[in-house]
Image (cartoon, grey):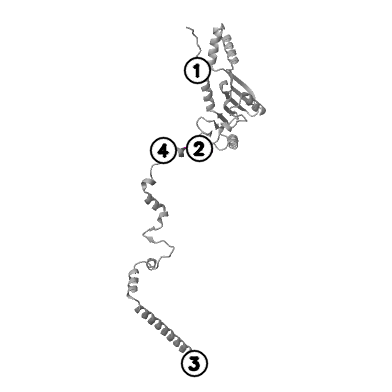
Amino acid sequence: MCKNKVLLSSVFCAAGILCAAVSAWAQSEMDLLLFEKKNETPAESSKTADEIDVNATFSSNLAKVAPPAENEPKVTGQISTNESENWLQSLISKGKNEVFKDPEIAAVEAEEARVERILQNQRSNAANFDISGIKLRMTPEETEKVLTEQGYKRIMQAIEIPNFIKWRSEELCRVNGVIGFERLNACATRVAKENGYHFIEREVYNRYSTRESIDVYYTSSFTGNLSHRIFYKSSMPLSESKASKNVYLNNLKIYDFWKRIDMKYGAPDNTSEIKWGLGGKKPYLKAKIGELELADPLLKDLDQARMFNEDTRLANTHYYTF
């Protein structure tokens, strides 16, 4: 028991000595700081006091006291000194009149032409399209060969003569003594054929096994008797019944039609009209359920223009000799 009391007293004595030593060291450090503070110059003391604001944040005071880095640009307010490379400084230096000035008319037209070329390059050239192998500007002989190989059969062929040629031929036959409607008509047709004015105006082909038909329309002999419009129609029946079976079968037929359209021609250039083409008078392709139309309006207009020129040439005929 006595030994424990002696040991406890020894521990307390050692702790007291240690605390006294720490207090003495701390007091000496404090005295040293006070001595250095007294030796500071008045200029340095006043500068620090002026720069430090007790009401500001620590980061603000630090920015005032700490010098900027060598590579860091000096900041004045909110605008950097390197603002010559900044879009805002460029706007201010050039002036609003130069930046927002009206573009020249020639530049605007050139830009519109460039955009139009881009759009046309993205559109489809329907002149390269075909329906069952038939393309625009094919002759009747070429059309017949292609469709016959696919199982189509020609069921109708219409021969035509331009009206102004027919009427002039009838007048010529009448002057030469031909009378009667049938004889006059036969004479006028013969005269037109001999002069190469007759042409195949339309042909109709049918494939009974698949219930499909194709109408081909041709220009006159003035433009080589070439196809300018091809019309395809499928007679695959779509039931009007609302029964589940009929609705299902109708959907299958419609889906197969548009799937084949997409695989053959791609997405249409005009989705509202379901139309492919470069626009204007250029060739186009239009589609709706069970029907396709491939046409070349420019070729038809050219044919009409050449017939008009021929009619003008024949109008110089002299009937009178006085």
Mark 4 to mark 3 CA distance (whole Å): 110 Å
Q: Under tag 1, what secondary structure?
A: helix
Q: Which residue is mark 3?
A: 6
Label 2: few (<14), some (14–19) or many (≥20) C-alpha neighbours in 10 Å: few
| Disc 1: which residue | 312
- Disc ID at residue 117: 2
- Which labelled disc corresponds to residue 279? none
Magenta segment boundaries in residue numbering: 113-121
Mark 3 is on which residue type?
Answer: Val
Q: Residue at x 54, y 26 (%)?
A: 299
Residue 179, quarter of picture: top right
**Which of the labelled discs sits on residue 105, or is there none?**
4
The earlier-in-sequence mark between 1 and 3 is 3
Task: Give how far across and how far down residue 145 sits, in percent.
Answer: 65, 26
Distance, label 1 to label 3, CA atoms, is 146 Å
Contact, mark 1 vs mark 3 (Cβ under 8 Å): no
